[in-house]
Image: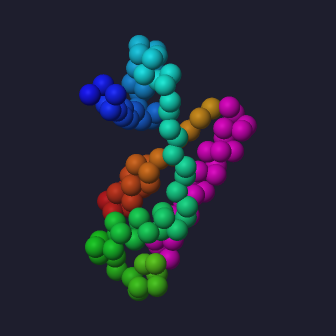
Amino acid sequence: LKDNLHVCLCFSPVNAKFPIRAQKFPAVFNVSINWFMSWPVDALVAVSTAFLSAYKIDCAKDERQKLYELLGSFQAQVRETCELYIARMRKYVYVTPKSFLCLIDFYKS
């Protein structure tokens, strides 16, 4: 059983408890951390389309598509700005898929 047992722990680096857990349990964080690649703009547009297609927006169909593309480009621009911020200030800012979903929920409200 021990030979085939695999455990996957997922922690968000945005969570305030992340650095505390890293200090308390260094063996967990010393193994390997997988950083996921950023989403392409086409994927961001597809996600915004999927989440907002059922939401009633009073505009033409082509304007709705432009809105979906705009939300995707906003997230891509924020990601690029974060990379610039890291290069200049040497501080990390994380842009995750969850932050993109929060942007979509913010738009809905």
Which picture quadrant has residue 88? top right
In the image, taking residue 25 as reference, residue 1 lies left or right, namely left
Residue 108 at x, y = what percent? Answer: 33, 63
Check the picture and name the quadrant holding the C terminus: bottom left
Q: Which secondary structure dominates the residues rendered in magenta?
A: helix
Residue drawn 34% across and 28% down?
A: 3
In the image, taking residue 41 as reference, residue 109 lies left or right, namely left
Q: Is residue 68 magenta?
A: yes
Residue 57 at x, y = what percent? Answer: 34, 76
Instruction: From this view, report whether residue 44 is shown above or below residue 21.
Output: below
Q: Is residue 70 magenta?
A: yes
Residue 37 at x, y = what percent? Answer: 55, 49
User: Is residue 22 shown to the viewer in this render?
Assistant: yes
- Residue situated in front as seen by the camera: 101 or 28: 28
Q: How is the image coloured?
A: rainbow
Instruction: From this view, report whether residue 64 is shown above or below residue 30.
Output: below
The range drawn in magenta is 66-90
